[in-house]
Image: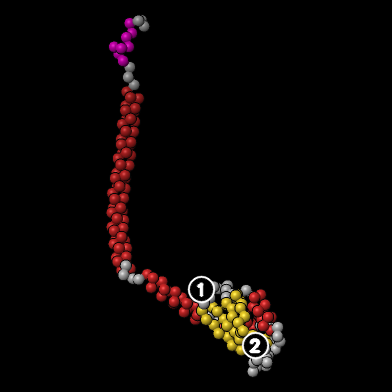
Amino acid sequence: MDYRSLNLSSKPFYNFRFLLISVILVYATSIGFSVFTISKLYGIFKLSEDSKIKIENLNKELKSVVQENANLKERIRPIDKKSLVQLAEEINSVIQERNFSWSSLLEDMEKVLPEEVRLLTLATSKSESGFLMVRIIGLSTKREGMLKTIEALKADPSFKNVKPINFQDEEKSSTIGKKFEMQFVYMPKRTENE
């Protein structure tokens, strides 16, 4: 055989099986990618439509909330806020007075009063700052009774601003003993529940 006379260009060699499989694979791959792309695009458009519906619903809800807010502002506008605050403070003051524990005050007084001192009267009032002012009149068998009472009240954290008002010796008074008067601020200790 003469290799010089062999012309491959006149008789090309094709492997049809390989070519056919390659074309089918390329075709199947392109169809697969096309289906994948179309499904993704459909999902995006579907998601976009769902998002549009949700956004429209949220906008409607927002409009209703804004309208309700405007209606509430219109209802609140004629209310006098200063008188409302003052009324709330008065109500809170009444609630505090009703919740005041007289037994706590009397127990605290009993703890601090010296043995020679007896309590004759006890009166309470509300100070401008909202604290409970207590005014007492006491009777002591000894001259130092008033001073011991003042020191004992100052030592207890429930009593503040202790001020003597009056002191009478037995010669000037019809009662036996030394009568005195004082006032202080009572600040009860907070319980664990409060």
Q: Which residue reaches farthest front? A: 172
x 46%, y 75%: residue: 92
Q: Quadrant of the C terminus?
A: bottom right
Q: Which residue reaches farthest bottom? A: 174
Q: Is residue 55 above or below residue 106?
A: above
* Element class at badge 1: loop
Q: Is residue 68 left or right of residue 192?
A: left
Q: How many marks?
A: 2
For badge 1, the amino acid type reads: Ser
Pick whichever of labels 1 and 2 is earlier in the sequence.
Answer: 1
Magenta range is 5-12
Q: Is residue 62 above or below residue 25?
A: below
* Element class at badge 2: strand
Q: Is residue 38 left or right of residue 106?
A: left
Task: Determine which of the numbered discs, if any, sits on residue 129 in the image.
Answer: 1
Nearest the camera: 58 or 34?
Answer: 58
Dividing the picture into quarters, in which one does residue 11 lie? top left
Dividing the picture into quarters, in which one does residue 109 lie? bottom right
Q: Quadrant of the N terminus?
A: top left
Q: Can you see residue 170?
A: yes
The stretch drawn in magenta includes residue 35 = no
Q: Is residue 145 above or below residue 35?
A: below
Q: Is residue 137 left or right of residue 2?
A: right
Residue that numbered label 2 is attached to: 168
x 44%, y 76%: residue: 90
Residue 108: x %, y % from top left: 62, 80
The stretch drawn in magenta includes residue 6 = yes
Distance (Cα) linking label 1 and label 2: 31 Å
Residue 151: x %, y % from top left: 67, 77
